[in-house]
Image: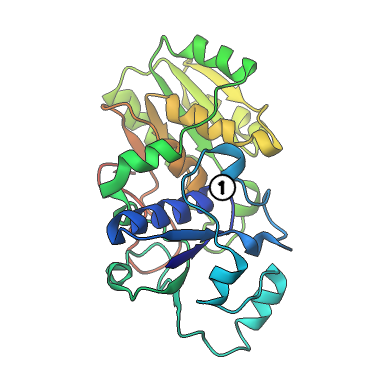
Amino acid sequence: MKIVRILGGLGNQMFQYAFALALSKFYSEDIKIDPKAFIGYPLHDGYLLNDIFNISLEEASVKNICKVNYPIFHYKIWQISKHILPKHHKVYFEKEDMVFDKNVFELSKKCYLDGYWQSEKYFSLYKDAIYRDFTFPILDEKNAALVKEFIKSKTVSIHVRRGDYLNHPLFKDLSDLNYYKRAIEYLDSNTKTETYLIFSNDIVWCKENITNLLNGKKIIFVDWNKGKDSFRDMQLMSLCNHNVVANSSFSWWGAWLNRHEDKIVIAPRKWMNVDRELDIIPQSWIKV
């Protein structure tokens, strides 16, 4: 049995789950997920996969986990203990964030996998299974009305993540206004887009800045999906014809789940302020 830890925001949880689902297909064995680290976790909205999707992998029991890892489930205690306790010989840690590790497909039978696994390379062979497990629930009335309005035209989703990213050393200055200018110019030259849907944690900034880049195009600022309903933004992104993503796992999944065959996905040329090559951006996406 292999167990994959689930932790982080919704986009991170989806990467970890897709990775676990791919392992279950590759090894043809029982793979379980472990969301117990959300006990005491201070960020985001907690464990969300079960609330949103009808996922197929089962959660690991305490007994399962004790066979491959220390039975420490409170997030803060785990953060401390992993620097104190000797490394458990059955725990496999991700070597580098956003860098594909082929060794995960050569592991012994029992182990616990701890990481974010943010690369399509882990699960690209199992797209249909992931599409099935990441099927969104039926749209609520307000979002359904929006889809009915924009489905008749060519649409682009634009995701702008500000807030915590503005001064974060790993993400600062990467998805700036010039990035969105280049992305919109590319789409204007290569598509017949009529409507832009803007998603952001700073809609006021978008109204003051992104509007000026769109030259009279129809713009819809989506600002009503809050809290536990935030996943609706990702669902709407996936229904657009094309996508402009921020360096965010949330809009990454909105674009990846877009099943239009002719879709264009624009991503930042540099995803993080690091010197190594990253594997998070699929080859078919356009980097600007």
Q: Amino acid at mark 1?
A: Leu
User: As displayed, is residue 75 above or below residue 146?
Assistant: below
In the picture provided, is 248 more to the left or to the right than 207? left
Few, some or many residues within 10 Å of mark 1 (<14, 14–19, 20+):
many
Taking the spot 44% from the left edge, 30% from the top edge, the residue there is 238
Residue 131 percent location from the top left of the image: 38, 37
Q: Is 31 drawn above or below residue 83 in the view shown?
A: above
Q: Quadrant of residue 161?
A: top right
Label 1 SS: helix
How far across and how far down the image is residue 41, in percent?
A: 70, 61
- Along the line of sight, which residue is nearer the eye, 157 or 79? 79
Q: Which residue is mark 1?
A: 10
Q: Nearer the viewer, residue 33 or 217?
A: 33
From this view, report whether residue 236 is shown above or below residue 180.
above
Q: Residue at x 35, y 36 (%)?
A: 265
In what quadrant of the picture does the C terminus appear? top left
Q: Residue at x 41, y 51 (%)?
A: 18
Q: How many marks?
A: 1
Q: Is residue 215 above or below residue 78?
A: above
- Residue 115: image location, x then y, percent: 48, 66
Q: Position of residue 120 (x, y in %)?
A: 33, 51
